Image (cartoon, grey):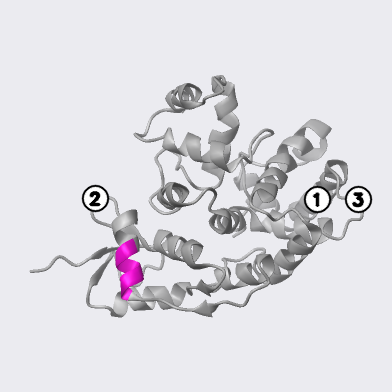
Amino acid sequence: MIAIMRGAVKGAGNPKKLQLVVRCADPPAVYEVILDRYSFASHNKVGRRGGETHLLLAKAMGFLDYRNVITIDAGKTFLVLSDIMDVPKEFLLMQLLRKDRTFLIPFLSVFSEAEDRTIVMATEYVDCVLEDLWKKYPDELNALGFERDQHKTEFALAHFINPRLALLKQIGVNDAETQRRLAKEFDHYVDCPLPDNSYFLLANAVHKKQPTNFISEKMILGAYSTLKGISYASIVGLYDYLNQMTIPRTVINYDKLFDFLRGSGKFNLHPLETLREGMFRVKVSA
């Protein structure tokens, strides 16, 4: 299985506007209603079309599901973190890697070596990377809704690469050296799931730090009260939340977090204790 982001369009990539459009999906509503809310909530009185670019990116990055419902893992975590800090940069980068690494890592690898790092040069590298992906994964790309050579026009290329470059710039990953390190750290995960120590790799690439691993019950209880819905919270959401709050000095390994929850007497896992991307809650006292 490959991960490559669909739905990003020219004009997207601003974390604040991305956050606003996700907030406008609460309560869940049809596409047009969310755009109306976004238009009303925007101080610059943008039209509905102004919100469409950010809504499409929100869905592509997994913050909203196909019903325009805020996802319990990425979407909920994004809003919670955005209430605490200006821009949750490492979390946004991790989510981008999850959804786009099959394209993003090969692109950053070659683009980081370019002497001329302009948008014109970026679009040339996009063309090369997507050409290679079509050779390797034609069935998968077709299933994701790609059309062969659709990106080749100047207009389509700008729509494809601009949101990615804009978001990378906003989260501080726009210089060649950082992009080179990021591509190197995640090179083995271009077409397979990210490892359980993803935030360690990210800290090494972005901050040039090798953080320690630490987890405590107190940390989890504090995060649970912030992340939970009616009763349950997402384990992946917990993983992202804790790492964003502690990086780059300390990070949490996903498998160790999962084992900690499973082995503790204070938490219930749902629906199965072996489900790696499940939910958890604090046990109710008898």
Instruction: Work out how far the residue at label 3 is from the one at label 2, CA to CA, in angstroms.
Output: 51 Å
Q: In which quarter of the image is residue 217?
A: bottom left
Task: Give the number of the disc on residue 114.
Answer: none
Comparing 8 with 94, the one in front is 94
> Can you identify the residue that label 1 sits on?
131
Which label is found at residue 116? 3
What secondary structure is found at the residue carrying circle 1? helix
Which residues lie in the magenta part?
Answer: 217-222
Location of residue 16 in the rendering, given as x and y in whole percent from the top left corner: 55, 40
Going by the numbered disc 1, the residue's amino acid type is Glu
User: Can residue 147 be seen from the camera position used here?
Assistant: no
Q: Can residue 141 be seen in this view?
A: yes
Of marks 2 and 1, which one's residue comes earlier in the chain?
1
248 to the left or right of 205: left
**Badge 2 density bin: few <14, some 14–19, many ≥20, Cα 10 Å:** few
CA gap, disc 2 to disc 1? Answer: 46 Å
Q: Residue 230 carries which label?
A: 2
Q: What element carries label 2?
A: loop
The relative height of residue 22 versus residue 280 in the rendered view (above or below) is above
